[in-house]
Amino acid sequence: MKSRRYENETFQKGVTRRRFLGASAGTIAAGVMVSNLTGFRSLAMAEEGADTSGGKNVEIPSICEMCVWRCGLIAKVRDGVAYKLEGNPEHPNSRGRLCPKGNAGIMTLYDPDRLKSPLMRVGERGSGQFKQVSWDEALDYVAEGMKKIKEQHGAEAMVMSSTHNLAQLQFENLLQAYGTPNYGTQRSLCFNAMVMGFTMTYGTEAVGGDYPNTKYIIYNGRNLLEGIANSETQDFMAAVERGAHVVVLDPRYSKSAAKASEWLPVRPGGDLAFFLALNHVIIKEKLYNKKFVDEYTQGFDELEKGIKEYTPEWAEKECDISAKKIVQVARGFAKAAPAAFAHPNWRTSNTLNSFQAERAIAILNALVGNWKQPGGLMPAGGEGGMELGVIPQPPYPRISAMRLDAVPMRYPLVPLNLGVFQELRDAILRGKPYQAKGWLIYRQNPMMSLCDRAKTLEAIKNLDLIVTIDIIPNDTAFYSDVILPESSYLERYDPLSVAGSKVFLRQPVVPPLYDTKSGLEIFKLLGDRVGLNEFFNYKNEDEYLNAQLKPFKVTLDDLKKKGYYEVPARHEEGKKPEKDVFQTPSGKIEIVSAPLSQVGFDAVPKWKDLPKPEANQFYLLSGKVAHHTQSSTQNNQWLAEFVPENHLWIHTASASSRGIKDGDMVTVESKVGKVTLKAKVTEGIRPDCVWMNFGFGHKAKGLSTAYGKGALDSDVHESISDRVSGSQALSQTMVTVSKAAV
Amino acid sequence: MNHLNARIHVYEILASLFRPPDDVSSGAEECGGRLLERLLNTVQECCGISARCCLRPDLMEEIRGLLRAFEEDEDQAGTLTRLAAEHTRLFVNAFPTLVAPPYESFYQEGRVMGKAALDCRSIYAEDGLTVREGGELPDHILTQMEYLRFLCLGEKRAADEGETEARGLLRERELSFIEEHILNWLPEFCGRIQSNSHEPYYRVLARFMKNFMVLEYRNLNHPVELDPFEEVFNEVKKV
């Protein structure tokens, strides 16, 4: 058939048969048919003079969703088909550039595997047998199920979970109006330790530093070239190019380590020892900023006393970085300060010491007085500071039920909005303190993201209702009873997004290809059916967006055209900035944290011994590559061309002693599971560690590009939680590796 | 029923067969077994002797068997659900892999809304047609079947009014659409259904559809007034 196609193409270069005939035959056909298209499902007579080409060449501004960074994009659309996505130069998160994933968004839109219609399970759960149903049928079923659960077991028996999305706002509205305290987010699998470590020290998160002016940066595992945060990744590259001194601690030779001035292959968990020793040197050698410490911090004396034992020589044994190097880094960092910062990092769910490591990093920054200084540490700004309009609604019902994720009972300090997701799963499995009955999951993939997948699969057997809202048939959808298809980010509206001083709009760049809806519409339709219509006082997306825009002097039509609205700066009347007051109990940067000691945790960071691998074992590490976002992009054919599967990184010496050659299939085994994947034999990893990229090993066979490729670390990861921050300790599972039997 | 009327009906039925079989919005009358029955009757009426049409005796017998099974079925609702699940697995979303994506673009570019879809859309536009909101994509099998039905309806009108030239032009148009689009992908599409469907219903449909389209192609290329089916029978057998 290929050759026929080519023949036709050649033929079409001249005058095609149909085009030659077009006018006469077409006119005749049309002339007789106008009244006769009843019963046609897809085709209709075009209105007189209507544009049937699908639209001319247009460029439409919107917001990317290939990860959660929310870059501004400009979609180039020809004949109604999006053919190129580019970074919007007006958007601070993209500055005119998109990452590999953002560029490949086209293929997420036009992926034939996408969810196209509401589906309901007709076979056993996990049999993969679904049937296409109407929205009414699917939503009625879900609403009935949710009402029944609430009546019979209370709203708390319904678990709801979501990842970081623009429409998450309305998802949270639904769960609060419904009245369940059980909300699962990805946070405890990601950044609980970082957020809590910095919040308990500064009263706010710090998100990074003043890159253009910095002279010295220390990253602890943060890998901006593979865990891309577009604008910050650009900042990182510019700083490297400018000649800033960059130190990267990572057991693996990541792309960021390759660009750094120094790669320090730290022992997993030894990072706390390294930062304690940096603090030790800086205090001992009086390299700290005394004026700043006196004025803005509290608890220095206690730290000075406690830190004495953490000498570089002691630390060397725990982190495998030489005492000499530790001293050198401490001196270099202090010398460059305040134009220096130790990065707060991002995914810090690594070991049971990670929270205290983050505390030690926060304190290190405080000692050199780099807070808000040129080249120093910068507080989170981003989405705060601008009030969007809201639609009036009644107060939420009071929730008295205990949370299933054991916050605050077992995790007294974990903020309610962070939660401990893995505990929620464990409670579903145990049925205690009460049995959850339903789970509504929005754009999240807990069947892959939660450690110890076997446990998750066991837990869902206790549920009567599992509903997934997503754009692709992922592993969680596979095990669901009802699947509701959301329109892709290039086909829908979402709540407004604030970046800096601008309000940005995500809007459709093409109409939905299939029978899908936006989250905004789905939550409203569901809310109405569950009897919560007064919490969803909008008819459609336009009405919702208009309400959000109300405080600003801009119309929705203008916003659609331009893509954003810049809020005029308020006149400051030349006031000098007031002295910083920190949102902590003492109003100062808390080197000693009273809230920590009140519940029995260490008030200043202290070392605790961690388990180490036996002679034949490795630390199992996991992380990202630049071409994929978590487990959501592996089915994107363009991205799969670059990274179609994951490999197990293993050191040359460790591989050779096991007879493993590059590309061999190897089996990785822990206490909880076993996976097989290809080995990548490399010098770029510590001999006592193996590493794999998260997001592969899909069980959902609906993903024809991703299914069966690589392996999933969650099948092998043990579920170990830090009591302070609720973080999952993702680098504390020990595994054995052997050549797989062929 | 004459040949042209039969073609109109067959295209209508083929389009309907790609709707969910339990979709009551299209009228319960049209669901599942009913459609098969209409298909069988239409083709039988059209060609008289089954052995000489695209319904070769064994295919005919398979359809009769399916019809009997439907009639004797004591759990029709259950059967329809099973067929609906199979429909979803074949054409909408599936675990495992979507068996037969019903989009021409997929077979050329591995995606949807590729060149084929755009080309179809502009062909429809030439005839004053557009894909309605909520309709399938322009190169979806259902849309393509509807377009051929549309052309056949035009051809019938021309025939009724004795507009020989116009009828000829419409037949040319049908032929070129089949040549430039249908034959690009339908054999593989039907082949995927035939080799992978769990349900004889869809296997039979796919086999019939493939035979029918090749027959259409041959017939439009070499019109034989008396017995088109006899003429092409040997060709069909090869497919």
Image: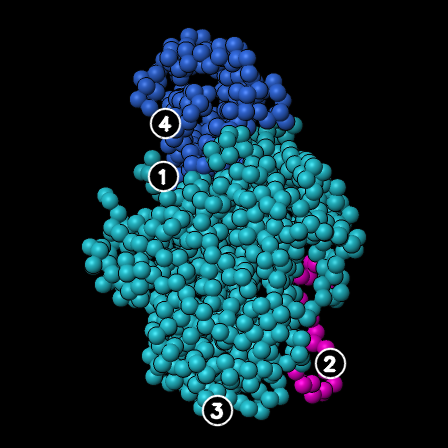
Q: Is residue B61 visible?
A: yes
- Reply yes or no: does residue A150 show up in magenta: no
Label 4: chain letter = B
The colour one sees for chain A in the rendered image is cyan
Disc number placed over residue A5 in the picture, else none: 1
Give percent across and percent down for residue A187: 55, 59
| Residue bearing mark 4 | B195
The chain to which mark 3 is attached is A
Q: Which residues are magenta?
A: A554-580
Categorize mark 3 by other alpha carbons within 10 Å: few (<14), some (14-19), many (20+).
Answer: few
Read off the residue under disc 3: A286
Labels 4 and 3 positioned on one and the same chain: no
The secondary element bearing badge 2 is classed as: loop
Count residues near mark 1 (Cα–Cα under 10 Å), then give few for <14, some for 14-19, many for 20+: some
- SS at mark 3? loop
Name which residue type carries label 2.
Answer: His
Q: Are marks 1 and 3 in contact (CB under 8 Å)?
A: no
Q: Name the residue tied to disc 2.
A: A571
Q: Is residue A554 left or right of residue B3?
A: right
Residue at point 47%, 33% (across, down): A127
Q: Are marks 4 and 1 in contact (CB under 8 Å)?
A: no
